[in-house]
C-alpha cells in the first residue's frame, strides 16, 4: 500500500466513524481547488456511507493540483506542502517529514540548512485595500522610513544558495522543505541556464564574505517549448519540478532559470539581508504615506510588466515586503504579503433573474446564466449581491455579459457586452420560500433593498437555527440540512433541534438520510450540548439584533448571569435599578435592545440553558500574541472567543504562539514568564482553545 492509499484509508475511517465531517475540511483548507470542492460537495450530499472512490478522487485532485512529478510520484511545492500539512493535521495525522507522499529512493540527498529559512507561506490578499492596510499597520509598528518592496511573485521552486568566498563558488543549494533541512540540488543548480551570471553577481555582492541567496527556480515559456520536444511534460510546473526532484533528469536543468530574490551577507556572526528581486520596485513608507495611490500604481506596473507576452516567466501576483524588519528577524516571513490576482473571465448569456433568501431574510438578486467555464468551475448561477447593483448594471433578459472571478471567490458580473432583449430583467417581489411579499428597507449604503419579514418563513426560522448551531461551533451542518429537517419533520425551533435524539428514527427514514447521516447529526448535537459554552457565547448565538457575541461576552464578564436572569424573571431589571446600564462600552439603547430580546425569548432561553453546558465568561481584554506567522482565520476564531490577537506583548498577554522559537517576541515572552506554544505542535484552533480554557 502506498503512503497515499494509507492516508486516504485513515481519512475514510475518521469520516465513517463520524469523528469528522467532510465539509469542515473545506474550512480547514480554504485555498482548495474548485475541482476538489465539487467532489467535496458530492461527498457531502451522498446518502449513507461515504463513497471511498470519490474520497480518493478528492484527495488525488487535491494533491494533483500540486503535483509536479512526471513519473506518478506525488510531489508538492513548499507552500502546498503547508496546505497538505494543514489537511493532515485536521485529521490529526502525522505530518510527513518530507514533501513526498510516495517513498522516493532516487531523490537528491537531504542536508541540514545552515542559514535560517523563512518558514510558513506568505498571507494572501486579494484587494488593494488590504495591501494598504498591511503597509499601514507594518509601518505603524516600526520606525523611521521603512523600505517597502513590490516584486513579482514567481511561480517556481524555492531554493537557498550558499556562496563560499574562499572557493569563489556556490557550494550548496537546498530546497526549503520543512525549514530545518532540504534537498541538496547543487549539482543541478550548476547546470541551470544562468548559473554563471548568478555566481558572478554573488561574487560582486558578497566580496570576501559568506553569503546566501534565496531564489526561485523557474522555467521560461520558450524553454518549456524546447523541453517538451525532448520530454513531454504536461505543463511548466510539472516540468520544473519533474526536473528538480528527479536526479536522473539533470540533463534538462539547462531549461531552468535561477531568479535571485534575497541576498544575505554573513559578516562575522551577523546576517543582514537585502532584497533584490528581478523586476521589483523599491519605495518607502514615507513616500506611500504622501501618495497613497502609489500602492495601486506600483502593483499595476508589476502586473503589466509580468502579464504581457514578452515576459517569459510564470508569476501569480505581487509580493510586498517590509524591508528593515527582516534585518532583525531574518527567518520570519511575517512582514510580507502576496497580492493575488489570478483573475479569470468568461462570457455568458443571462437566462432569467430570481431571488435567493439569506438566513436573516435578506433578499439577494440572482441570475441564472447559460453554463460557462470560469476558473475550472462550471458557473450556472451568479449573485448580484444587492438591488442597488442591479440598478447600476441595468441588466436585460438575454444580455450577453462578461463574468469575472478573482482568486477562488464567487463569480461577478463585470459588464454587459451585448444587449439582449428589451425587457428589463425581473426578479419578482416575493419570497421564493414562503411566498410572502418582500419588504423594502434602507440599507447601510442608503439604497433600497428587500427582505422577507414573515416570522413563520421556514428560511428565517431554519436560518436562525443554523446560525445558532454554527456559532456554538457545530461542524458539518448546512442551511440546507436544517431547512430539510425543519420542513420534513416539522421541528419548529432551536429547542427541538437540540432534542434531536427524539426524532432520530424519523430522521433515518428521510429521503437522502440513512443511519450514518442521522447518527452524525445527532452526535454533533450531543457534542454541542456537552461542550462548555459561556453565557455570552450562548446569548450571542441567539442572534440579538445588532449585538455581537463579543459584546455579549464582554457584558457577562462584568454582570453576573444568574443574578441578571433572576431579575429578568421577576421583571425587575429596568433602567431604574440596573447596574447593567453602567457597564462600560454599552449604550442605553444597546442594553434596551438586549433586555427586550431576553424578555420576549425568556421561555426559549430558560429551556436552552438547561440543555446546554453553560459556564461563566472570563475577563475581557486578554490577548494572545502570534509570532512568525499570520493566519487571519485563526485570528477571527480567537476574536470570536472574546480574546484579542495582539502584535506586541503587553500586560494583558496570556500566551505567545510562535512559528519561530528564536524570535525577539519569543525571547521577550520567556523573560516575562508568558507561556509559549509551538504553532506546529497541534491544530491552531486546539492550541487556542486550550489557552482560552486554561490561561485566562
Ligand atoms: Zn419567506
Image: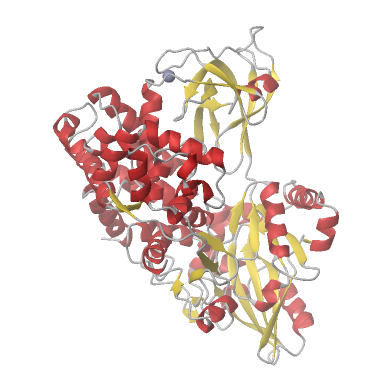
Q: Is residue 405 left or right of residue 687?
A: right
Give the quarter of the figure containing the C terminus. Answer: bottom left
Residue at the limit of the structure toward the left, as seen here: 505
Ligand 1 quarter of the rendering: top left
Q: Quadrant of residue 208?
A: bottom right
Q: Quadrant of residue 690?
A: bottom left
| Picture coordinates of residue 602, whole percent (x, y) | 33, 35
As drawn, 25 above or below 272: above
Q: Is residue 618 left or right of residue 117?
A: left
As drawn, 160 above or below 393: below
* Residue found at x 75% / y 63%: 149
**Viewer-proximal residue, 538 or 582?**
582
* Residue found at x 27% / y 35%: 495
| Picture coordinates of residue 154, whole percent (x, y) | 65, 58
| Picture coordinates of residue 623, whole percent (x, y) | 51, 64
As drawn, 19 above or below 343: below
Residue 383 visible within the image: yes
Amino acid at each position: 500500500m502506498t503512503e497515499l492509499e494509507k492516508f486516504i484509508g485513515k481519512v475514510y475511517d475518521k469520516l465513517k466513524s463520524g469523528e469528522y465531517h467532510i465539509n469542515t475540511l473545506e474550512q480547514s483548507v480554504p485555498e482548495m481547488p474548485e475541482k476538489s470542492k465539487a467532489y467535496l460537495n458530492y461527498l457531502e450530499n451522498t446518502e449513507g456511507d461515504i463513497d471511498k472512490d470519490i474520497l480518493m478522487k478528492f484527495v488525488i485532485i487535491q494533491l494533483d493540483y500540486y503535483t509536479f512529478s512526471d513519473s506518478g510520484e506525488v510531489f508538492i511545492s513548499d507552500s502546498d506542502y503547508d496546505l497538505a500539512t494543514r489537511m493532515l493535521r485536521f485529521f490529526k495525522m502525522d505530518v510527513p517529514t518530507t514533501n513526498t507522499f510516495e517513498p522516493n529512493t532516487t531523490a537528491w540527498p537531504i542536508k541540514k540548512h545552515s542559514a535560517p529559512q523563512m518558514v510558513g507561506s506568505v498571507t494572501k490578499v486579494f484587494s488593494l485595500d488590504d495591501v494598504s492596510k498591511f503597509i499601514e499597520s507594518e509601518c505603524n509598528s516600526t520606525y523611521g522610513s521603512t523600505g517597502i518592496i513590490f516584486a513579482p511573485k514567481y511561480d517556481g521552486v524555492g531554493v537557498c544558495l550558499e556562496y563560499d568566498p574562499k572557493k569563489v563558488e556556490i557550494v550548496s543549494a537546498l530546497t526549503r522543505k520543512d525549514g530545518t533541512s532540504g534537498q541538496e540540488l547543487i549539482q543541478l543548480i550548476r547546470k541551470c541556464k544562468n548559473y554563471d551570471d548568478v555566481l558572478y553577481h554573488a561574487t560582486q555582492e558578497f566580496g570576501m564574505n559568506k553569503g546566501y541567496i534565496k531564489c526561485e527556480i523557474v522555467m521560461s515559456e520558450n524553454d518549456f517549448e524546447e523541453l517538451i520536444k525532448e520530454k513531454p511534460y504536461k505543463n511548466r510546473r510539472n516540468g520544473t519540478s519533474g526536473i528538480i526532484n528527479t536526479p536522473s533528469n539533470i540533463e534538462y536543468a539547462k531549461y531552468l532559470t535561477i531568479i535571485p530574490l534575497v541576498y544575505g551577507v554573513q559578516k562575522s556572526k551577523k546576517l543582514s539581508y537585502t532584497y533584490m528581486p528581478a523586476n521589483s520596485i523599491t519605495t518607502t513608507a514615507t513616500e506611500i504615506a504622501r501618495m497613497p495611490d502609489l500602492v495601486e500604481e506600483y502593483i499595476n506596473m508589476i502586473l503589466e510588466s509580468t502579464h504581457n507576452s514578452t515576459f517569459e516567466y510564470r508569476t501569480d501576483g505581487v509580493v510586498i515586503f517590509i524591508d528593515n524588519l527582516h534585518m532583525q528577524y531574518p527567518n520570519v516571513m511575517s512582514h510580507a504579503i502576496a497580492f493575488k490576482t489570478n483573475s479569470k473571465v468568461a462570457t455568458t448569456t443571462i437566462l432569467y433573474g430570481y431571488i435567493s433568501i439569506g438566513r436573516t431574510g435578506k433578499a439577494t438578486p440572482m441570475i441564472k446564466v447559460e453554463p460557462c467555464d470560469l476558473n475550472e468551475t462550471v458557473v450556472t448561477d451568479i449573485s448580484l449581491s444587492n438591488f442597488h447593483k442591479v440598478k447600476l448594471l441595468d441588466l436585460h433578459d438575454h444580455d450577453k455579459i462578461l463574468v469575472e472571478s478573482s482568486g477562488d471567490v464567487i463569480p461577478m458580473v463585470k459588464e454587459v457586452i451585448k444587449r439582449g432583449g428589451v425587457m428589463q430583467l425581473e426578479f419578482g417581489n416575493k419570497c421564493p420560500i414562503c411566498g410572502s411579499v418582500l419588504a423594502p428597507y434602507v440599507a447601510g449604503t442608503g439604497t433600497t433593498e428587500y427582505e422577507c419579514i414573515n416570522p413563520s418563513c421556514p428560511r428565517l426560522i431554519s436560518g436562525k437555527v443554523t446560525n445558532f448551531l454554527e456559532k456554538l461551533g457545530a461542524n458539518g451542518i448546512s442551511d440546507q440540512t436544517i431547512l430539510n429537517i425543519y420542513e420534513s419533520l416539522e421541528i419548529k425551533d432551536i429547542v427541538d433541534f437540540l432534542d434531536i435524539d427524539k426524532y432520530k428514527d424519523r430522521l433515518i427514514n428521510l429521503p437522502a438520510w440513512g443511519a450514518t447521516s442521522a447518527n452524525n447529526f445527532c452526535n454533533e448535537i450531543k457534542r454541542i450540548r456537552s461542550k462548555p459554552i459561556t453565557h455570552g457565547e450562548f446569548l450571542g448565538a441567539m442572534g440579538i439584533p445588532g449585538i455581537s457575541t463579543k459584546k455579549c461576552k464582554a457584558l457577562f464578564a462584568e454582570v453576573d448571569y444568574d443574578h441578571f436572569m433572576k431579575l429578568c424573571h421577576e421583571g425587575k431589571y429596568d433602567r431604574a435599578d440596573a447596574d447593567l446600564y453602567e457597564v462600560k462600552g454599552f449604550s442605553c439603547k444597546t442594553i434596551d435592545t438586549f433586555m427586550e430580546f431576553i424578555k420576549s425569548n425568556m421561555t426559549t432561553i430558560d429551556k436552552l440553558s438547561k440543555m446546554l453546558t453553560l459556564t461563566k465568561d472570563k475577563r475581557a481584554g486578554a490577548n494572545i500574541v502570534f509570532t512568525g506567522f499570520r493566519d487571519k482565520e485563526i485570528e477571527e476564531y480567537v476574536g470570536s472567543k472574546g480574546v484579542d490577537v495582539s502584535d506586541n506583548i503587553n500586560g494583558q498577554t496570556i500566551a505567545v504562539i510562535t512559528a519561530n522559537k528564536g524570535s525577539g517576541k519569543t525571547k521577550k515572552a520567556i523573560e516575562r514568564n508568558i507561556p509559549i506554544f509551538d504553532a506546529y505542535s497541534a491544530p491552531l484552533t486546539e492550541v487556542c482553545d486550550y489557552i482560552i480554557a486554561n490561561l485566562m
